[in-house]
Image (spheres, rainbow, N blue to C red):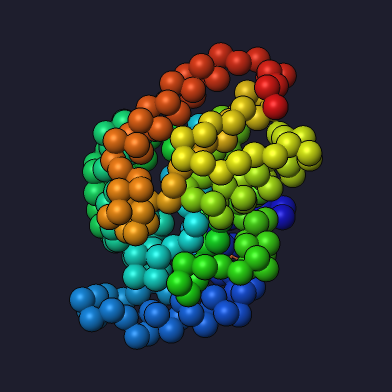
């Protein structure tokens, strides 16, 4: 995918209509709306990357929520998952406020950008393998446009699989390496990079306390320390 800059990539993502099932679903949700949001004009399109390409950390989510990102047009914005994630990012110095409500709410990210394995809201939050494959080139293009990137943080198994696929495609990981998804794992990749894994901050995972604020904060603190360590790694540093 020959995209020359971040804004062009986001424009391309927003205009994408490759997955017929997801196009139909995101537009249907935008028309029908949830009662509490009936006065909103839903976004109803693919949700672009959030943040700046100069960031050292890229967080990879699953996909926009039907009434969250698909409504507001910004990833992790306007739903309980976003509330959880940004509260933790705020407490660890990765953003300027603990809430993410709408696109013009003043939220700024520090040294982190946020993307998703799939840029359109899927029914039941379950994109098919074909849909995940179709959206993967956007993740790869995102990675290639981030010159300072050192760390990937995958939220949930699907995002983790996409990050492993990316690491293999970019020669950051041997083809025969087997990485297990588990919360708190931080894997060393080639060239001073790393891949961290977290449970997805879905309402189900946070309400049941499978994922707690303390767990997310602890992982983000580890990541921050790792970013600082990797800042002095040599270009050919490889721990994969
Ligand atoms: S999921 Fe990705 S590839 Fe599929 S239509 Fe949305 S943006 Fe395009």
**Ligand 1, image quadrant it occupies:** bottom right
Quadrant housing the N terminus: bottom right
Asked whether, in this view, residue 105 is left or right of residue 161, the answer is left
Q: Is residue 73 visible in the rendered structure shown here?
A: no
Q: Position of residue 87 (x, y in %)?
A: 26, 43
Q: Position of residue 135 (x, y in %)?
A: 62, 61
Q: Residue at x 35, y 48 (%)?
A: 210
The residue lying at 39 percent from left, 71 percent from top is 66
Left or right: 136 as drawn, with respect to 82? right
Q: Say which of 11 and 64 sits in front.
A: 64
Residue visible at 20% across and 76% down in the picture: 36
With respect to residue 162, does 213 lie above or below? above
Q: Note whether 204 is above or below 58 in the view shown.
A: below
Quarter of the image holding residue 11? Answer: bottom right
Is 124 drawn above or below residue 58 in the view shown?
Answer: below
Numbered label tally: 0
Residue ranking furthest to the right: 175
Residue 220 appears in view: yes
Query: Where's residue 137, x and y in %?
Result: 67, 56
Does residue 165 appear to the left or right of 28 in the view shown?
right
Residue at 51%, 41% in the rendered image: 182
Q: Is 124 situated left or right of 186 in this image?
A: left
The C terminus: image quadrant: top right
* Of residues 171 and 161, the one drawn nearer to the viewer in this rendering: 161
Q: Position of residue 18 (x, y in %)?
A: 64, 73
């Amino acid at each position: 995918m020959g995209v020359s800059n971040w804004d062009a990539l986001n424009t391309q993502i927003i205009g994408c209509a490759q997955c017929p099932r997801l196009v139909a679903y995101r537009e249907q949700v935008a028309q029908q709306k949830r009662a509490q949001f009936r006065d909103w004009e839903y976004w109803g399109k693919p949700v672009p990357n959030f943040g700046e390409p100069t960031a050292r950390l890229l967080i990879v989510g699953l996909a926009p929520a039907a009434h969250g990102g698909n409504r507001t047009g910004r990833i992790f914005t306007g739903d309980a998952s976003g509330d959880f994630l940004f509260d933790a990012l705020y407490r660890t110095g990765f953003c300027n406020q603990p809430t993410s409500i709408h696109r013009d709410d003043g939220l700024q990210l520090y040294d982190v950008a946020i993307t998703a394995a799939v840029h359109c809201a899927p029914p039941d939050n379950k994109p098919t393998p074909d849909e995940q494959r179709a959206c993967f080139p956007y993740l790869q293009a995102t990675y290639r446009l981030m010159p300072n990137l050192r760390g990937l943080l995958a939220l949930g198994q699907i995002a983790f699989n996409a990050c492993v696929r990316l690491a293999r495609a970019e020669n950051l990981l041997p083809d025969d390496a087997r990485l297990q998804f588990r919360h708190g794992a931080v894997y060393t990749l080639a060239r001073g990079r790393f891949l961290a894994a977290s449970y997805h901050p879905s309402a189900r995972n946070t309400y049941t306390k499978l994922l707690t604020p303390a767990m997310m904060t602890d992982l983000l603190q580890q990541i921050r320390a790792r970013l600082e360590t990797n800042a002095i790694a040599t270009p050919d540093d490889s721990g994969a």
